[in-house]
Amino acid sequence: MHQEYTVVEGDFVNAGKASSSVKKTLKQLNVNPQVIKRVVVALYEAEVNAIAHAYGGTVSVDIDADKIRMVVADKGPGIPDIAWAMEEGHSTARPEVRDMGFGAGMGLPNMQKNVDHLNVTSEVGVGTTVEMEVKFV
Amino acid sequence: MFYHALQVEDGRCIGCSRCMKICPTEAIRIRGGKASIQEHRCIDCGKCYEVCPAQAITVAADDFEAIHRYSHPVALLPAVFMGQFPDDISVSRVYATLQELGFAHVMEVESAASIFADAKNKYARENPDRFPLISSFCPAIVRLIQIKYPSLVENIMPIKVPLDISAMYALAELQSRGIPCEEIGLFYITPCAAKIAAVKAPVGEEKSLIDGVINMSLLYNRVYKKIKELGKDYQYKPLSRQRLSADAILSTLTNGERRICAAKRSYAIDGIENVMDFLDKLENDEVEGIEFLELRACDQSCAGALLSCDNRFLCGERMYTRARKAAERERNGEMSRDREMDKFKSHLIEHSLVDEVQPRSMMVLDPDISKALAKMEKIEHMKEHLPQIDCGVCGAPTCEAFATDVVCGQGDLHQCVFYRLHLESKGKMTLGEGRSNMYAVWGDDRISGEIEV
């Protein structure tokens, strides 16, 4: 089962559309509610990241009988030091984004906490790709 | 499988599909020209009842005459019942008239509002790890969460509502006066269908103490008629009754629980669409730091309940007026006899817990995830070909609901009028076959002669 969503830069109104849709799908698949919660929280964080800090991007989701794989690929600006950004409180957010209440540096750590597997790759000036995997059992 | 108070009376149903389109849980389909309710999806909210132009949706309550089976029938009234009557009919007159009609005792269930509030506050203090706590007050909301938001069932406080607490009180109090249990008949006067379902098929309890449920609007007619018959000069027998506090009177209206709860951050949300919108956010963890939620299915809460006879705002205002008078009495130190219940308070609080609410998701396509995935792929494929205009001619509320029905063996793809036209134009279906598909959904008397304009 494959699903794709587009995330538009600065479109906070529609933040959560992809995670809500994935949530509905997982409910129909009878996935454990607590697992659904972890998926939704992680994906929502990633969605907001692409909207707030990056220049938008795409969310693609693949669901199998035993796991969900989510890839959120944004269009930059990229993270120079991923290991640093993975620490709680570390953020590369621009000042205007921080003014809106984002950029507390909790996004990536929160994703890490909720998924079974997280892989972040980034190239400055090109974009960041967040790959996440959650097992259903 | 699940008890429902809302039923379709086939003889009256005109198959107009208004109910199908308004149902918040997509529980209604049209088959053979009549509406049919899918019981695993229905939450007894009553939206269908409100919108039906043919009074074909009925509320299955008990017959009034059932009260005569007991030598001590007790009327357990919701405070909104008093809000139905014009200003010149006093609360004591309504109480006395209920006695004239045959009730031996009359009690407003909101007398238990303060005990309900105490039990909730106690639970909140002991369970901060379960925030945000959701009030168990509205049975339609409890059922909505069970079927549509299974991950949130553990946030529902497993606490008896004022109705059940007052029933426990009435039983204990009357028995303490030497009246045998089997002579006491507890009758709840219900303002909505969901409360009937809650009594007949309680969530978190084996059986309710309530012996019968009486439709509030029917009782209103009876009481009002009796008052008119007896006339203005009739001398009522004085009746001992509990005076409700202002907090108790307001507790069934929107914000009624929230305004007296101890939570730091809380919301009161009424109207089922508003509630669903909020629960979607809550389920995504998009809103944080909430301690308490008062959620009510009806707009203006119980003042807007489906068996409320008068306009919800008029009813609400009358309740506010009554609450203001009660508050004035309280300020003058003249209180309120609802403290009588305090004698039994420790007993009532001790017995106020029920079992945890269990989820019963309506969303699951198949218990086996591989099969569910296969079904979902089929639904997605079907959706690409369906018109996506949610016309409802197939007898389902949306194209998506229709596709789901088809995949789950509860619908026939040929019921889609667009797909049928496609098949007919390709010569893969005859006009006659198309027509019998139409009849299957809408009945065979819908297509009449030619219209001259």
Image (tube, coloured by chain):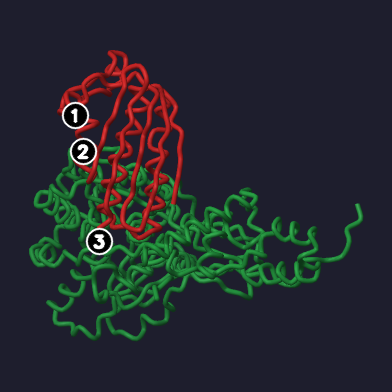
Chain colours: A red, B green
Residue B382 found in image quarter: bottom right
Residue ID for mark 2: A112
SS of the residue under disc 1: loop
B28 sits left or right of B31 in the view:
left
Residue at image coords 44%, 64%:
B41
Residue at 31% from the left image edge and 44% from the top image edge: A40
Q: On the rendered structure, is A121 left or right of B190?
A: left
Q: Amino acid at mark 2?
A: Gln
Residue B57 x %, y %: 54, 67
| Circle nearer the viewer, 3 or 2 | 2
Q: Mark 1 Cα within 10 Å, few/some/many (few <14, many 20+)?
A: some
Report how far apart the C-alphas of labels 3 and 2 lie in the structure.
41 Å
> Pointer 1 indicates a residue of which chain?
A
Label 2 with label 1: CB-CB less than 8 Å: yes
Which image quadrant for residue B20? bottom right
Q: Amino acid at mark 3?
A: Val
Residue designated by label 1:
A86
Q: Look at the numbered disc 3 and give the secondary structure of its residue.
A: loop
Foreground residue among B228 and A97: A97
Question: Where is residue B412 drawn, in percent x and y?
Answer: 62, 67
The image's mark for residue B161 is: 3
The relative height of residue B290 versus residue B195 in the rendered view (above or below) is above
Q: Is residue B325 among what the camera can see? A: no
Q: Chain of mark 2?
A: A
